[in-house]
């Protein structure tokens, strides 16, 4: 059986005749944004002007913090709760958590004929709630046997802390990481070091969103601001 799914050269995933995930396609009415990592944000500004967009509440809040007044005034951007089907006129769209980063989702569309098509998005395994579909596009990150990690997440975090403790003896440390990963780094450091954590204005806003949704990320000091931000006094 042939299913109506495909992957564009830009990385956007086509589900059925009307949906593209994490990309722009002028013939697709709907875009689903699985999460806010830069490699999944291709042509997002174009999509805002031409498509109806769906995403999780957390992803919407992170993007609203970045784009400020732009997203809240748009009526073509909708946030959805997890596991709640949404009738979009060409089937039922449902988002499930993928455990990758705050707001990251799996995407399932049940077409009018009853076929369930899905895209995993980036995910962490084991996943608490894998969705059930008839055809699935799996994100290819670390899909090669050569990319299998021979260590656990816990081991990586312990080694990260050991490295930080060693480097702090010599002076300040500059940590560079992608979205999601840098927030995880700040969470790991929270309560473990007795020096201020300095962040850019954009990162402090994103950390505020993480805290809003219950993530155990400690307070940080915004660069260029006289007071500690998000949950701590000066």
Image: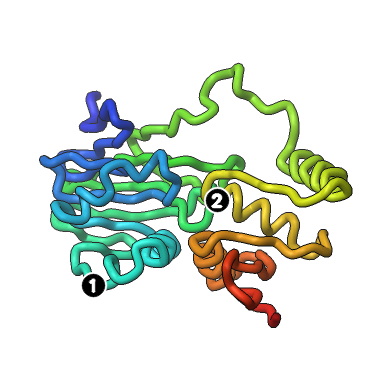
Which residue is identified by label 1? Answer: 73
Q: Nearer the viewer, residue 136 or 192?
A: 192
Q: Which mark is residue 211?
A: none
User: How far across and down, in percent of the image, does residue 158 sit?
Assistant: 81, 45
Q: Is residue 217 left or right of residue 192?
A: left
User: How far across and down, in percent of the image, does residue 210 sit?
Assistant: 55, 65
Q: Is residue 130 left or right of residue 39?
A: right
Q: Residue furthest left?
A: 27
Which residue is identified by label 2? Answer: 180
Mark 1, other Cα within 10 Å: few <14 / some 14–19 / many ≥20: few
Residue at 59% x, 64% y is 223
User: How far across and down, in percent of the image, does residue 13 sit?
Assistant: 29, 36
Residue at 73% x, 48% y is 173
Q: Is residue 134 left or right of residue 48?
A: right
The Cα atoms of the two marked residues, 2 and 1, are separated by 26 Å
Mark 2, other Cα within 10 Å: few <14 / some 14–19 / many ≥20: many
Residue 92 visible in the picture = yes
Residue at 25% x, 56% y is 53
| Of the image marks 2 and 1, the number of the one nearer the N terminus | 1
Residue at 76% x, 51% y is 172
Q: Nearer the viewer, residue 39 or 137?
A: 39
Relative to 71, residue 135 above or below? above
SS for dot 2? loop
Q: Residue furthest top?
A: 146
Residue 194 is drawn in which quadrant?
bottom right
SS for dot 1? loop
Relative to 120, residue 60 above or below? below
Residue 20 is drawn in which quadrant?
top left
């Amino acid at each position: 059986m042939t299913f109506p799914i495909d992957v564009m050269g830009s990385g956007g995933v086509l589900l059925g005749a009307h949906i593209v995930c994490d990309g722009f396609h002028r013939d697709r009415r709907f875009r689903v944004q699985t999460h806010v990592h830069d490699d999944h944000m291709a042509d997002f500004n174009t999509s805002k002007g031409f498509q109806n967009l769906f995403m999780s509440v957390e992803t919407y809040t992170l993007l609203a913090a970045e784009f400020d007044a732009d997203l809240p005034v748009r009526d073509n951007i909708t946030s959805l709760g997890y596991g709640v089907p949404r009738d979009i006129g060409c089937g039922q769209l449902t988002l499930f958590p993928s455990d990758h980063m705050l707001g990251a989702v799996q995407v399932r569309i049940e077409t009018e004929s009853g076929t369930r098509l899905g895209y995993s998005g980036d995910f962490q395994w084991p996943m608490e709630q894998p969705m059930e579909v008839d055809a699935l596009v799996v994100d290819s990150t670390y899909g090669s046997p050569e990319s299998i990690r021979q260590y656990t997440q816990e081991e990586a975090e312990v080694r990260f802390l050991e490295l930080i403790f060693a480097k702090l003896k010599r002076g300040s440390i500059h940590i560079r990481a992608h979205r999601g990963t840098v927030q995880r780094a700040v969470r790991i450091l929270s309560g473990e070091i007795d020096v201020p954590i300095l962040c850019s204005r954009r990162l402090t806003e994103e950390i505020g969103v993480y805290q809003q949704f219950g993530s155990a990320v400690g307070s940080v000091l915004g660069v260029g601001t006289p007071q500690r931000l998000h949950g701590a006094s000066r």
